[in-house]
Image: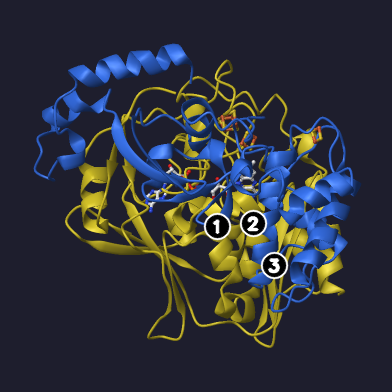
Amino acid sequence: MTIAENDWSRREVLTSTAGGLAGASLALPGSALAETRQYEALDVRLVVNGTAQAMRIDPRVSLLDLLRERLGLIGTKKGCDHGQCGACTVLVNGRRICSCLTLAVLHEGDEVTTVEGLGSRGALHPLQSAFIANDGFQCGFCTPGQICSAIGMLDEVARGEPSHVSDDLLAPVLSDPEIRERMSGNLCRCGAYPNIVAAIREAAGEMNA
Amino acid sequence: MKPFALHRASSPREAATLLTRETGARAIAGGTNLLDLMKLQIETPSLLIDINRIGLNAIEPTASGGLRIGALVRNADLAAHVTVRRDYAVLSRAIVAGASGQIRNKATTAGNLLQRTRCPYFYDRSTPCNKRSPGTGCSAIDGYSRHLAVIGGSEACIATHPSDMAVALRVLDAQVETVDAAGGVRTRALPDFYRLPGQDPQLETNHGGELVTAVNLPPPRRGRHFYRKVRDRASYAFATVSIAGIAGPDGRRLAYGGVAPMPWRDASGEGERTADRIIEATFAEARPTAQKAYKLPLLRGALRGELDA
Ligand SMILES: Cc1cc2nc3c(=O)[nH]c(=O)nc-3n(C[C@H](O)[C@H](O)[C@H](O)COP(=O)(O)OP(=O)(O)OC[C@H]3O[C@@H](n4cnc5c(N)ncnc54)[C@H](O)[C@@H]3O)c2cc1C
Ligand code: SF4
Ligand code: FES
Ligand code: FES
């Protein structure tokens, strides 16, 4: 979504029928529905890194674009915009998702955590420290997604969720092959994979200690 | 992306009514397939019905000893559910063999069943494709077809259904439940839920766009459950071929992915003694193009690996 498109949609919002579809009953005639269809903006409230946000936006805006373009949280990256690279990974209600493959308006009331919300300069998240200590990156473009993904992934392991390489579906244990498989949704063009695995292994040990 | 209106449905009934009454309406669940295709303008709905807050997100035992899986249950939650891991392991295995952790956290049971093909020409709007633009022709038949179907296709389309989960549901004899605008409930086994392409590859299912509410599993089948997936890289790729199986006291059941327009099962081959003969019998009607001929030996090797295990 470009800025120009945003302006366009905002203009259209002013001309769209008040109330609109959000308040529509099932009895709404088809023609009225058709009129309100194209240009309706929607209200959405989210909690992003602990701060409540309320916005009226074009329903086409992805969660990723909302974070980057509207809230200026540019730590989360856009790699492919199609769910294929993991650079846009954020935590929604504690679970990792690709923010490029969801619409912001689908997240009414949700709590979103981006890399900016994990730690501060003086008090980094254990995964952030471990990525630095282990050289878990080169250019750094994939890193915010890697770190958010790793946090969600370690929670999944802690909850006992199995993976493709778990021998025992009922009792998965964290190992290097498990880390590699569970992190396969995060690509790194620089190929920092061995150090990424080392960083996650180290942080997992510390977080359990 | 084309403009659309979005309506937040608050009940299954409301969603079912809007879906069947409003032209151009589509449900959006996880959005991981629909939004991908909308960004490419392959899907251009004018009205999206957000079904994420209508319930239908529970996994419950049924009176007959089976399991009822709500349409909105996330793939990750289904694979991790203790009863599924213990009694329907083939389903857990198939789900975790697909996509990535991030995508499985969003993807839903119904959305997974209804995901569209990964045929490269379906994704490329500059090429003819009967499924995307009926009547324009099929670019794959004389084109790049190594990922496509070896059985069940037609002269109009040789696309495969890409889901791993659906292959396990096929071997488990799952039933898909839908509801229409009047509240009428129907259930269909997967072979009746899906359609073969014939002359109309744009029609992929028989549920008429109605709301999918649940998937019902019969009581568990004892035996060794497995899901073997072969792909071009070790993880995060669609299957070239896959096999869901249950080998137990009541015999052997097998379903295949990556080979047909729907998860494929042919019970007549299952009684054969060796892996080679099972594949030979099951795929006797297969008509692979030269690019896809590798799939048959690959199936034999994959099945040998499981049956000798
Ligand atoms: C990078 C990538 C890799 C992937 N790899 C794999 C893989 O290896 N194996 C695999 O199996 N899958 C894979 N997938 C596909 C993934 O499994 C699907 O995108 C996902 O399951 C779709 O579920 P969803 O809830 O997000 O569906 P949506 O995108 O929300 O919907 C998909 C379709 O279903 C319809 N729909 C959804 N719910 C209902 C309902 N209740 N009633 C009626 N219609 C409904 C929608 O209208 C839409 O047409 C991959 C996807 C990506 C992006
Ligand atoms: S195989 Fe089907 S989806 Fe692929 S180009 Fe041919 S018609 Fe289109
Ligand atoms: S930008 Fe979202 S997965 Fe690549
Ligand atoms: S560090 Fe450069 S892409 Fe991963």
Q: Which quadrant does ligand 4 occupy?
A: top right
Residue type, numbered disc 3: Val
Disc sitting over residue A152 in the figure? 2
Residue A10 on image: x %, y %: 31, 19
Disc sitting over residue A157 in the figure? 3
In the image, which lettered chain appears yellow? B
Q: Which residue lies at the image location 76% right of the left edge and 71% below the top edge? A: A208
Question: Both on one chain, marks 3 and 1?
Answer: yes
Quick one: B26 or B9, which is closer to the camera? B9
Q: Nearer the viewer, mark 3 or mark 1?
A: 1
Q: Which residue is mark 1?
A: A94
Direction from residue A126 to residue A27 in the image, left or right: left
Quick one: A71 or A12, which is closer to the camera? A71
Element type where label 2 sits in the image = helix
Who comes first in sequence, dot 3 or dot 2? 2
Residue type, numbered disc 1: Gly
Residue type, numbered disc 2: Gly
Q: Are marks 2 and 1 in contact (CB under 8 Å)?
A: yes
Element type where label 3 sits in the image = helix
The answer to whether residue A49 is above or below residue B279 is: above
In the image, which lettered chain appears blue? A
Question: Both on one chain, marks 2 and 1?
Answer: yes
Kindly report the distance in space between the C-alpha atoms of the residues bearing marks 2 and 1: 7 Å
Element type where label 1 sits in the image = loop
